[in-house]
Image: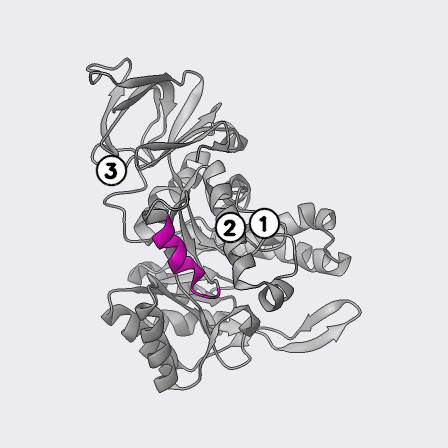
Amino acid sequence: MAVVLTGGMLVDGTGGPPVPRATLVIEDGRIAAVHDGDPADVPAEAEVLDVTGMTMLPGLINTHTHLCWDCVGDLKEQSHFDSPTMVALKYAMNMRHCLQAGVTTIRDMGSPYGIAHVATQAVAGGIVVGPRVFHSGRPLSITAGHAFWMGTVQVDGVDGVRKAVREQVGNGASWIKIMASGSREEGLTHKGTVWTNAFPEFSMGELVVAAEEAHAAGKRITAHATEPRAIRNCIDAGFDAIEHGGDIDDESLELMVANGIWLVPTLSPANLQVERGAEIGMPEFEVERRRGQIAESNDETARAARAGVRMAMGTDAGSPAVPNHEVAREIELLVESGACETPMEALVIATRNGAQLLGVGDRLGTLEPGKMADVVVVGGNPLENLGALRDVHLVFLGGEQVVTDRVVLR
């Protein structure tokens, strides 16, 4: 049965002017038509929903998540002690939280036990309700490298990297993720884990063969990279994206633009841990460490945007104080940091750009006829106040209504 949403403002994700009073027609899981004003031709027996006073948007796309974590507990502790069953339960919970926030597509950037691939199968088979899942399987790190405890594949040498990439592709990964920079743990103190300064991990030869193997299999490759030399190494090796980013020099920014390399800046962890870390029991010293990162991170993200680097929205959900149902803050931060001049620009990053990063811009990311009907209806006007994104009334996934007033329907 067709569904018609009428009376609300429509922001289609392309960056074009909003339609103040629009009608959106959904048929057979796709957007059949978009009208300016009242519906011209309502399909017979269509369900008509009046969304006057609300805003229709494409489904939001969170391109950096970790659905295996609960956003409260210590990440290392969860990684060590959560059983496969507990990981699966957290994953199912977080998929529902994504939908409640209007997130209809995610890219999982690292989970253990092959759970991300199982989740894609479960969603496709109708076993559980959840967003569309793209994932990197288990990230690759050097032996004892950055976050080796999170279930990464610890590899060394060109042959080891080649085999590990092939294994992840064979296990269903749609992306390959490399931990290209990190820091060594110096040990636990009364203040928690102490880290050394970040440094490049993996040799150029290892990075090059990782990119070659990923691309040969038709997959894309990205890197956790926060250190300038590591970022440049990944650029030179032919990576498709950089996660987090850092102090990227002007020449590297120019190369990212020239080669179409994406940046997913993940501004949420530092900001939300400062804003809410004390509430979940984060140590004060860790909150202060994060506070010291905010200004620099904002400046670096704004510099990249001014240089013309393409960006997609990613929250690093699962990190402490960063729940999967909180994406509005990341979108707000894109404006507050100076990366975006307007809320409209930030909404494009959170919708169309995410689909383009994932290679599915031909079917997702905008509200245009022929696209999959991933639609979110929020109260108010997010172009005036991005906080309106927290007021989720309706969510459609492939034309199926899956959320009403933040309640998942099945």
Q: What stretch is highlighted in magenta?
A: 112-122
Asked if labels 2 and 1 touch by Cβ distance under 8 angstroms, the answer is yes
The residue indicated by pointer 3 is 371
- Badge 2: residue crowd in 10 Å (few <14, some 14–19, many ≥20): many
Asked whether residue 133 is in view, the answer is no
In the image, is 366 to the left or to the right of 152? left
Q: What residue type is labelled 3?
A: Lys
The image shows residue 391 at horizontal and vertical percentages of 52, 29
- Quadrant of res 217: bottom left
The image shows residue 105 at horizontal and vertical percentages of 38, 46
Whether residue 204 is in magenta: the answer is no
Q: Which residue is drawn at 38% across and 40% down?
A: 348
Residue 340 disc label = none
The residue indicated by pointer 2 is 315
Q: Is residue 177 depicted above or below 311 in this figure?
A: below
Instruction: Residue at the far right: name it.
Output: 190
The residue indicated by pointer 1 is 322
Given residues 41 and 409, the one toward you in this image is 409
Q: What residue type is labelled 2?
A: Thr
- Badge 3: residue crowd in 10 Å (few <14, some 14–19, many ≥20): some
Given residues 122 and 215, the one toward you in this image is 122
Q: Which secondary structure lies at badge 2?
A: loop
Q: Which colour scheme is used?
A: one colour
Q: Which residue is drawn at 53% across and 59% down?
A: 85
Kindly report the distance in space between the C-alpha atoms of the residues bearing marks 1 and 2: 7 Å
Kindly report the distance in space between the C-alpha atoms of the residues bearing marks 2 and 3: 25 Å
